[in-house]
Image (cartoon, grey):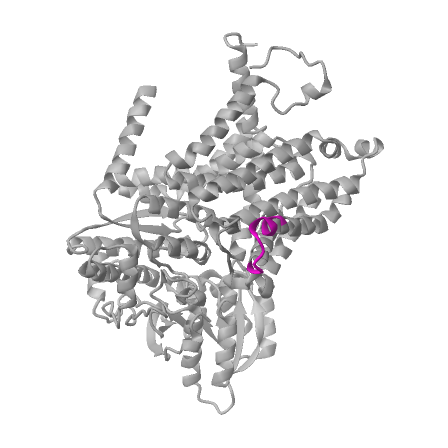
Amino acid sequence: MIKRILTLTVLMVTLLIGSTAFATLKVGVLSDLTGPTSSVGVPYAQGVKDCIAYVNANGGVNGEDIKLIQVDYAYNVQQALAAYKRFKSQGIVALQGWGTGDTEALVRFVSRDRIPVFSASYSAHLMDPKKAPYNFTIAPDYSTQGRAGLKYIKDSWKEDRAPRLAFVYPDKPYGHVPLKAMKEYAKELGFEITGDEVLGLKAMDATPQLLALKRQNPDFVWVGGTTPSTAVMMKDAKKLGFNGKFLVNIWGNDENLAKMAGAACEGNFGMQAAAVYGQDVPGMKMIEEQTKGQPKMTHYLRGFVSTMVMVEGMKQAAANGKVTGQSIKEALESMRDYDPMGLAPAISYFPGDHRPSMAVNVCTVKDGKLEFLETVSLPRDDKWLGK
Amino acid sequence: MQKCGLFFTTYNSEDQLFPSTFQKTCLGLFMAAMLAAPCVLDFYYISVMNLIMIAVIGAVSLNLLTGVCGQMSLGHGAFVGVGAYGCAFLATKGLPFLFCLLGGGAMAAIAGMIFGIPSLRLKGIYLAISTLAAQLILEYVFLHWTSFTGGANGMPVDSPEIFGFMFDTDEKMFYLIFAITSVCVLGVSNIVRSRSGRAFVAIRDFYQSAENVGVNLFQYKLQAFATSSFMAGIAGGLWAYYTMYITPEQFSIGLSISYLAMIIIGGMGSVLGSIFGAIFITLLPEVLNIATSMLETMAPEASAMAAPLKEGVFGLTLVLFLIFEPEGLVRKWKLIKAYWKLYPFAY
């Protein structure tokens, strides 16, 4: 029995080592497949994997296949740290990261090891190469997203008086990060800010917050939560006869919102960075082929685009010489208006500015489906970098 | 190996940490192996060992408070956070590493003492809720006291430097963390055998009897909170220096529960148990991850289905441990030692 177990163990270890020994371009994928953000982490990770499969099936990078090494870190920073070391020991040249906690915890490690990271954490300070030189994203920072959303609703405002604006967010770093920037910009645009309310990410009831909001009577409410808390907010708003419109942050506005909130979410606004499945853009044919026509969440498309941009950087690095973390970073920083086939706004990175673009997609829910409305573009203003 | 039966003729000899030459030799070999580890092991293993050693300091310190003194705490993760932020704040002022580390520990000790004051009136589950309040309050402070903690954006920390020598790799950090962990473990082992340690045990076993024999409950309970939080602060400081970037999310209630799981799995009231618990809890997700990776190599479809089971396996392992070895890993270790000592006789 012991002999069998030993033989099996040796076989498994050989397979594991053997499977990664021959691939030259290795990329780590840090995913939350089982943790608190897994509902969006799973489709995002699938997008990453499918993009790599697509790239490998279409010639790879300069003829070389990309080998993914995926670790499910369950949104635990300590596990993310250990996973990163495992990736590094296996010789990755780039990393597809995930959440805010782990991306921030790894900022200085990846800078020291010169490994570019694409993550789905959009804190503004991660866009500043002075603070995070090896961090990249394909979505503008939360502050830029918020500013674009504010510009959209201000542009569509027809009344003579200033529109009233309230903020609802969880008392977590994710909720707080864009607040200051948004409030400053809202004042600049001429909004009247009525106040703030705190709503936890696991809230089951938003009545107290909505009663307070009814007293403030805002025309618009920025919601900085995730889909479940946003759905609770919208359902309670409908129940209590609250008339304001909601403007939802990127993680609170996806295909699940209609499933959770039903008709209550119709007609509100939300920010997104990638296209919605089925949207009329050139790249959708490729996505539909890759997914065999099975609709996917917008997070899937974001994971796909994040990998497309990374691969483009790798291809550029290969064309310039050897593919290393440093050469990928340099290639990315020379990227100008790279169009991911319309699946996201065109992307440019600069040595002193890692904001991918200043364009944000505004979406709404119509007849139970997430729909793209408009792309709002802001100027690439230096005073906003990192803030 | 120790002889069968008690042959001590003085209290001092009975009270030794390592009473036999065999134990001293084993310890020497273990220390030598640890010192040689960075030269032979891949840096992935070294980084996992670093994480384990930081967890050991946290677990040993919580065991001193909860296992030895009987004061339940659900706020240990936040005290670790106070140490980390304290350390990072002092480091931004340009102070030397050791001063920052001790300063962070001192700040955590003060926080621990403040939140330990209710322990005079509260015990058991009531004290647990009071320390849970400490956790929530401190998490709020980490997020909102922006000038001290950097708020939602967190705080960068530079690698430690002692007399011009930078600890900027996993291997160098290994020696630093190993040295500090050894001091902490030795410190707690000695506290347990001291007058304070005996007072802690008396309070844990029955506080009224302890008071009747002259133990000042308030003083010793606060002392337990202060010492435990000080070491938690040291663990936090090392974490900050090791990860080089701290955010409020890193010191959530999950960390407190994780430390509690370590001492329950390892063995309450035992220094060795805390070490076993820290190793177990830190390694289990790694082992599960490696197992999932192996499964993925062989059967990608099965792996997709097995991934969500991972969290369940983690929970199940903990439950099975509590059912089959409620006194923790340290009890298992004692049984193994006894087996070899008595071999080939069963008793």
Nearer to the camera, B228 or A157: B228
Query: Picture quarter containing residue B329?
Result: top right
Q: Position of residue A212 (x, y in %)?
A: 61, 73
Nearer to the camera, B63 or A109: A109
Q: Is residue A152 above or below residue B148?
A: below
Q: Position of residue B168 (x, y in %)?
A: 44, 49
Q: Is residue A233 above or below residue B230?
A: below
Residue pushed farthest front? B163
Instruction: Specify the principal SS of the magenta part.
Output: helix
In magenta segment, residue B279: no
On-image quarter of the N terminus of chain B: top right
Please name the residue shown 20% across and 64% down the image: A285
The region drawn magenta spans B92-102
In magenta segment, residue B96: yes
In the picture, measured across the screen, residue A211 lies left or right of residue A262, that is right
Nearer to the camera, A258 or B242: B242
Please name the residue shown 59% across and 65% down the image: B147
Nearer to the camera, B72 or A207: B72
Q: Position of residue B31 (x, y in %)?
A: 50, 29
Q: Is residue A295 visible?
A: no
